[in-house]
Amino acid sequence: MSEVLRELVLRDRLDKKIQELPALPSAVMRVVQESEKLEPNTDKIESYISADQALTSKVLRVVNSAYYGLSGQVTSVSQAIVILGLQQVRNLALSVGALSVFPTRTPHHEAIMSRFWMHAFGTAAATQLIAERKRMGAQTAEVLLIGGLLHDMGRLLLYSNFTEEYEQILDYAINRGIVIERAERVVLGMNHAEIGQEMAVRWRLPSVITSMIGHHEGPFDGSEDTIVYGVHVADAITKHLYFPNEPRPEESLDPIADSWLNLSVRDLDELREQTLERVLEAWSGFAEAA
Ligand SMILES: [Fe+2]
Ligand SMILES: [Fe+2]
């Protein structure tokens, strides 16, 4: 099959998969509905989340790895609600639920998903360190955390529906020495950031989240909301920890985001180490539920 034809066929299948995006898990939908009521019932929200073990485990892992000073201390959903508030726990459940809609089919696929989760947790944790350094304020930090978790959800759709083809795309990128986003664009006509953006629109996620997902890979021209730079930098910090072939942070940082961040290579390395520590700590505290 010619390259062009192959691209057209893949693009057609990709469009279909985006259109047929699975609904969010029912536990998550119940949480969202309850939290949107005038007087949400905290007990109900807690029980909806707690009834889903995988959801609970992942929400607690994010909480324990991303929030400063909470490492290993939050062991229940009710505790998380008390400390972080209903709204943020709802947002975390929604994000984790959105990342869980694609089933894992094979052990190989499971291994990929496990790395994906590590990267998502790592990016989420890194957003908080960056928010702290840049004094971004608590509310911005909360939104940034969700962006960190969800930024690569387009990759999830690709991994899940095009496992073999996506691995070929990754090989193609490595062999040609180009970044993955470019290879995705060449083969699929869209990169994973743009796919994630489409997914976010379909799931009606808030526009600030949609925009972080859609633009996290750059390139930037300086007109973007700085929250997008925050996700971009957090992503760059955790990329090569979990995907050994990815370039080092200082190589994959967009120059505009880099100058916004304004950190030396040494400080970047320190951020990277701190992030890794937090994630590994939170990771080891829970049973596998990827
Ligand atoms: Fe990405
Ligand atoms: Fe990423």
Image (cartoon, rainbow, N blue to C red):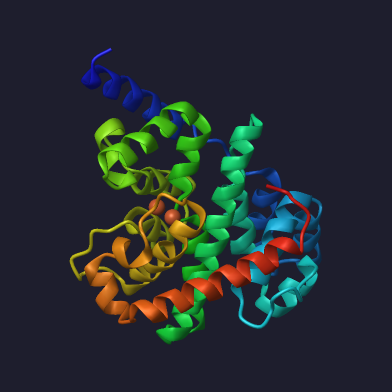
Drawn side of residue 80 relative to residue 162, left or right: right
Q: Is residue 151 above or below residue 138?
A: above
Number of numbered tags placed on the structure image:
0
State which quadrant residue 94 falls in: bottom right
Percent of width and height locating residue 133 = 44, 85
Q: Quadrant of residue 62?
A: bottom right
Front one among 43 and 241: 241
Vertical position of residue 85 compared to residue 96: above or below: below
Pick the residue in front: 276 or 231: 276
Residue 210 x/y as whole percent:
40, 56
The residue that appears at 45% across and 79% down in the rendered structure is: 131
The structure residue drawn at horizontal position 69% and vertical position 66%, both measured from the top left corner, is 282
Taking the spot 69% from the left edge, 76% from the top edge, the residue there is 71
> The N terminus appears in which quarter of the rendering?
top left
Q: Can residue 56 be seen from the camera position used here?
A: yes
Residue extending farthest to the top is 1
Question: Which one is in front, 111 or 31?
Answer: 111
Q: Position of residue 58 (x, y in %)?
A: 68, 57
Within the displayed image, which quadrant is ligand 2 positioned in? bottom left
Most extreme residue toward the left is 221
**Residue 34 location (% of width, % of height):** 69, 59
Residue 38 in view of the camera: no
Residue 78 horizontal side relative to residue 181, left or right: right
